[in-house]
Image (cartoon, coloured by chain):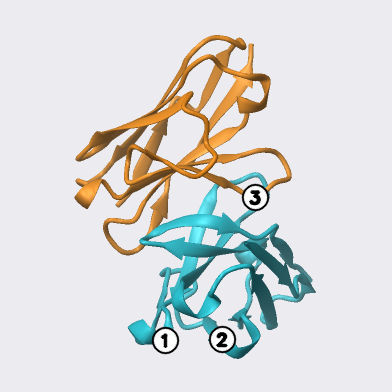
Chain colours: A orange, B cyan
């Protein structure tokens, strides 16, 4: 399953809300979709799993939604530490695949 | 939970390298474990996984590495391995080990850099 993320880069200001999209080439079974945040020089960090469940310690500013082929990560009230690269990942069908990433940058 | 990779370095095309990932802070033997790589300036690519022994201990690999890479585990040492043979320039990447939980990755190591170059 190919995952296409949009936009490639999103420029916003702190306090604004961000909407990141992940579109799958085939339906992702059981909403087996996760979102990760990666800051420069660091390993990715799990944010959302099963499309809408927040991982441990993730603030409720992060929310996931969607099903089938269209999924969204929404980040409300952007904080300075939220500016990073975000990846979606599907695990409904082998092989596991990741999207190409969306870079969220400070405007 | 802590995952610590080691073994990366510079290797010539066609060469071999073995990466290790030592796990601590959780019952290593009951978890599936995966390797994921990231080429310089690029996105994430799943390399492969090994299931827990209770689920057969079998392995799955991504197409680009199948037949060249082998994942194994030593539960007595809480260690995951990635044996990489016939290395190519396109295998240059940071290699992460990650704990897999029902298909998603809830903990990652800090990564180890593998550079394939003559």
Give percent across and percent down for residue A7.
45, 25
Name the residue tied to disc 2: B75
Q: How crowded is mark 2: few (under 14 residues within 10 Å), some or many (20 or more)?
A: some
Q: Are marks 2 and 3 on the same chain?
A: no
Secondary structure under tag 2 reads helix
Q: Quadrant of residue A14?
A: top right
Secondary structure under tag 1 reads helix
Contact check, label 2 and label 1, Cβ < 8 Å: yes
Q: Disc 2 versus disc 1: distance between alpha carbons? A: 9 Å
Q: Quadrant of residue B26?
A: bottom right
Contact check, label 1 and label 3, Cβ < 8 Å: no
Give percent across and percent down for residue B113.
73, 62
Residue A79 tag number: none
Decide: is B4 above or below A10. Answer: below
Residue drawn where x is 46% and y is 63% of the image: B100
What subunit carries mark 1? Answer: B
Residue B53 tag number: 1
Residue drawn where x is 76% and y is 68% of the image: B117
Left or right side of A36 for B5:
right
Name the residue tied to disc 3: A43
Decide: is B85 above or below B90. Answer: below
| Quarter of the figure that contains the C terminus of chain B | bottom right
Residue drawn where x is 65% and y is 60% of the image: B109
Q: Do labels 2 and 1 share a chain?
A: yes
């Amino acid at each position: 399953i190919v995952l296409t993320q949009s936009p490639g880069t999103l420029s916003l200001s702190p306090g604004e809300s961000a909407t990141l999209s992940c579109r799958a080439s085939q339906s992702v079974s059981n909403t087996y979709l996760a979102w990760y945040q990666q800051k420069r020089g660091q390993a990715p960090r799990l944010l959302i799993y099963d499309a809408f469940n927040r991982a441990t310690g993730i603030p409720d500013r992060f929310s996931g939604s969607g099903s089938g082929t269209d999924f969204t990560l929404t980040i409300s009230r952007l904080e300075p530490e939220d500016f990073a690269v975000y990846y979606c990942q599907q695990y409904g069908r082998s092989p596991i695949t990741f999207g190409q990433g969306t870079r969220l940058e400070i405007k | 939970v802590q995952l610590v990779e080691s073994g990366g370095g510079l290797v010539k095309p066609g060469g071999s390298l073995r990466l290790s990932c030592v796990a601590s802070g959780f019952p290593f033997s009951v978890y599936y474990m995966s390797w994921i790589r990231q080429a310089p300036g690029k996105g994430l690519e799943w390399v492969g996984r090994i299931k827990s022994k209770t689920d057969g201990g079998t392995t799955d690999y991504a197409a680009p590495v199948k037949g060249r890479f082998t994942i194994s585990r030593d539960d007595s040492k809480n260690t995951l391995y990635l044996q990489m043979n016939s290395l190519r320039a396109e295998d240059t990447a940071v290699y992460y080990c990650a704990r897999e939980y029902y298909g998603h990755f809830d903990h990652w190591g800090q990564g180890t850099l593998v550079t394939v170059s003559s």
